[in-house]
Amino acid sequence: NGNEISRASFQEQLDEGWVFGGEHEVYHDETQMRFFKANTHDTPATAFVSDYLDRLALHNSLFPDAAYRVEGIMTETKTSPSGRSVKRSKVVVSQEAIIGDDPSQAQIDDHMANLGFTKLEGYDKPIYRKGDIDVWDVRPGNASIVDGNLVIFDPRIDRVTKNELNQEKVAKE
């Protein structure tokens, strides 16, 4: 939406209401009942803003009941190991706080199957695939039952490359 987010104001909110997040810095705004998230650059999947926005669009189309809203861009300057100043842009998004009951993993499996996903075998955590899209980290802590509907709100979504799909095919043969 074109808003520039101040690192200082975001940090102030983090200091007051920080919530653990793996690929995001997260805080909960109790007044708005929303979680605000700034992507980190610690994982390859969030290294590029365009990749992050693609995954965000996928999330919103797959799970519209828990859609993210882009709040703006936060730019910060860090010093590289060689001593150079490096500017990084972080996308800041928000999501409504989803309050409901924890589903069972079987309910999540059924829900993902109803969305056309196949659960992949041989992994220690569930991974669901549909075409070139993998959805994982879908578990009771990242999903809720709200008014009888299962809502998935914090999955990890990745596009699988043709090369990765071909390697998997060869490995199975």
Image (spheres, helix red, strand yellow):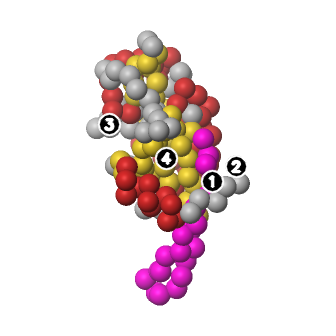
Estimate how packed mark 2 is, as few (under 14), some (14 to 19) or many (20 or more) residues with alpha carbons within 10 Å.
few
Given contact means CB atoms under 8 Å apart, are the residues at marks 1 and 4 in contact? no
Given contact means CB atoms under 8 Å apart, are the residues at marks 2 and 1 in contact? yes
Q: Mark 1 points at which residue?
A: 72
Q: Mark yes or no: residue 114 visible.
A: yes
Q: Name the residue under label 2.
A: 1
Q: What is the C-alpha distance between the residues marked 4 and 3?
A: 26 Å
Q: In the image, what residue type sits under mark 4?
A: Phe
- The answer to whether 82 appears left or right of 48 in the picture is left
Q: What is the C-alpha distance between the residues marked 2 and 4?
A: 15 Å
Q: Mark yes or no: residue 48 visible.
A: no
Residue found 42% across the figure and 44% down from its top: 28
Residue found 60% across the figure and 41% down from its top: 69
Q: Main secondary structure of the magenta part?
A: strand
**In the image, farthest residue toward the bottom:** 83
Element class at badge 3: loop
Find the magenta span and give its range.
69-88
**Residue nearest the viewer, comparing 125 with 26:** 26
Q: In the image, what residue type sits under mark 3?
A: Lys
Question: In terms of sequence position, does the residue under pointer 2 or pointer 1 come before the other?
Answer: 2
**Residue nearest the viewer, comparing 124 with 13:** 13
Q: Name the residue under label 3.
A: 125
